[in-house]
Image: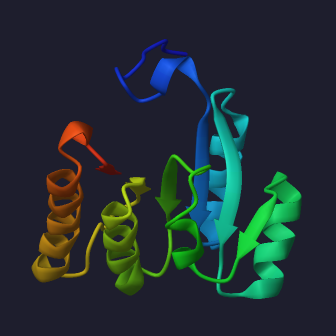
Amino acid sequence: MSDYHISGAVPNGNVIRLGYVGCGFMAQHVHLPNFSSLSDCQLVALAENRVELGQQVAKRFGIPNVYREHRHLLDQSDIDAVAVSADYAQQGEIAADLLRAGKHVFMEKPMAVSVDQAARILQAEREYCRRNEKEKRALWWAI
């Protein structure tokens, strides 16, 4: 196991309080198990439009807050970052909303379904940084 740290990723060595959008196969079988196994990551909120599924997955992973849509995560100060694995057509717009709110965003490929949508994601991050000059930081990661 490699031991590396990205400078500034965990402020002052604190735990990252993570929100998550989506409860599909990759979320349930890959991302949520991995995030929940990290000692410096705490899953604090889940957004899923399939209410029953969202409640089941939240219970399984011990996530205390469940919402029907990602917009409920935008203004919550107890969420540092949000991972998104929603429907491909929607996840680009979800990421842009989160970036405008100043949330760090982790998302799976593809980050967008078009060049225009990708441009909107990048523009959302730039808009946030312009409004918050002291917060010049990378807010998104796509893998």
| Residue 137 in view in this figure | no
Asked whether the viewer can see residue 45, the reply is yes
Give the total number of marks visible in the rendering: 0
Residue at the image position 49 percent from the left and 50 percent from the top:
81
> Residue 119: x, y in percent?
12, 72
In the foreground, 92 or 80:
80
Image quarter in which the N terminus is found: top right
- Which residue is pictured at 22% across the width and 37% down the height? 134
81 with respect to 138 (left or right): right
Q: Position of residue 34 (x, y in %)?
A: 64, 42
Q: How is the image coloured?
A: rainbow
When asked about the image quadrant of residue 91, the answer is: bottom left
In the image, residue 49 sits, relative to residue 100, either above or below, namely: below
Identify which residue, 78 or 93, lies in the foreground.
78
Question: Which of 13/48 is in front?
Answer: 13
| Residue 92 % position (x, y) | 32, 75
| Residue in view at x 56 percent, y 52 percent | 77
Q: Residue at x 64, y 69 (%)?
A: 25
Position of residue 2 in the picture relative to residue 139 (left or right): right
Image vertical order of residue 22 relative to residue 4, above or below: below
Indicate the quadrant where residue 15 lies. top right
127 sits to left or right of 16 = left
In front of the other: 67 or 109: 67
Measuring from the top left, give residue 71's x and y in whole percent: 52, 77
Place residue 64 in its image quadrant.
bottom right
Residue 3 relative to residue 88: left or right: right
Q: Check the image and report above or below for 120 versus 77.
A: below
